[in-house]
Image (cartoon, rainbow, N blue to C red):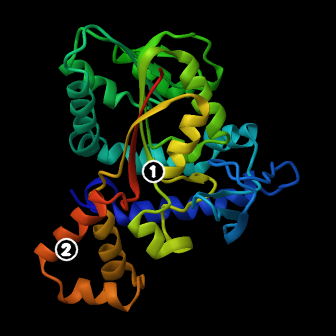
Amino acid sequence: MTEDDIRKRDIFNKYLELSAQDVAVFFKDKSSFVKSNHCLACQSKNIEMAFVKHGFQYDKCQNCGTFFVNPRPTMEMLGQFYADSPSTSFWVKEFFLPVAEVRREKMFKPRAEFIANYFKNQSELIIGDIGAGFGLFLEEYKKIRPQDRVLAIEPSIEMVEICQNKGIEVIPKTIEKVEQQELFNVLVAFELFEHLFNPEFFLTKVFENLKPGGYFIFTTLSGLGFDIQLLWDKSKSVSPPHHLNFFNPESTAILAESVGFKVIEKATPGKLDWNIIEGGLKHENINPGRFWATVSKYGSQKAKGELQNWIQKHNFSSHMRIILQKP
């Protein structure tokens, strides 16, 4: 899998351009932004400004390495942005839908296989997908474990209708507003954590909605990831107001344990870190530094493959997977 398989470069760049334009409309008035005086992960007050991008300040925790938008838009402002912004509409119609089936095969199907295999020795489960979108994960999961009850937890009116038309049971809310106490054996969320206004409250609500012994499995961006650390504020993954939070394996564990979870796995199974760096270098004149330009020009495919394997193995990929369990 390459970056171009799951997101076309020109379309992705157009989406980021529209997002930057939307900032001037939806976030012009920053007077109601919420300021935090401590790290969102470890609560340390030793936070310093890292950089500013599109008018949003990112602060970095000097204790655990987490960086995040601070001050940050309110949940209401973010909700309006995701509901009404041109960039959101573009993302659905022009960015996601044309590659939806490719993403199904290369992303959602492997996720479904991983999670179904993880619970292969367990009987009937109730599993919920937080931010289910088009329902691709649940469709693929249901093919493997038809005995399980699957639910989409999705606030978007359009996405709710799409999931219902596919025969998927839907809770038409965000998890923060769901009151189904201890309903689920398993909850999942993919590429959602980086968007959240309040990650601690989100995890608390997930905890409440899980049965004792239940699992929460999610993926998100790691701020210690290879490509993000190299490109820093020039990274396309750092794209406010969409991506507000950049935790890492250790800081995510700190926050999860403070909520009450037991950390089962903190891994970075990403495959695209080097591909992102090399693609930016070759196609967009992004400068990752002299050494990495040298690796791109003179390194063998074997060397590049081994580099990506090292990044993945040692938790330095920007794609992070966390498995938590409620005691």
Q: Is residue 203 above or below residue 81?
A: above
Residue picked out by circle 2? 304
Label 2 crowd (10 A; few <14 / some 14-19 / many >=20): some
Label drawn at residue 238: none
Which residue does the image show at 33% across and 65% down from the upper left?
273
Q: Secondary structure at mark 1?
A: helix
| First reached walking from the N terminus: tag 1 or tag 2 | 1
Q: Is residue 178 above or below residue 91?
A: above
State if disc 2 and disc 1 touch (CB < 8 Å): no
Q: Quadrant of residue 214?
A: top left
Q: For residue 117, what is the image quadrant?
A: top left
Does residue 243 appear in the picture of this structure?
no
| Foreground residue among 81 and 171 | 171
Q: Nearer the viewer, residue 124 or 146?
A: 124
Q: Residue at x 45, y 47 (%)?
A: 220
The image shows residue 156 at horizontal and vertical percentages of 55, 28
The picture quadrant where one finds residue 197 is: top right
Q: Badge 1: few (under 14), some or many (20 or more) residues near its Cα, within 10 Å?
A: many
Confirm whether residue 85 shows in the render.
yes
Q: Nearer the viewer, mark 1 or mark 2?
A: 1
User: Which residue sits at x=73%, y=62%?
Assistant: 46
Image disc number at residue 249: 1
| Residue 80, percent from left and from top | 70, 39
Q: Mark 1 is on which residue type?
A: Pro
Closer to the camera, 110 or 320? 320
Residue 10: x %, y % from top left? 39, 66
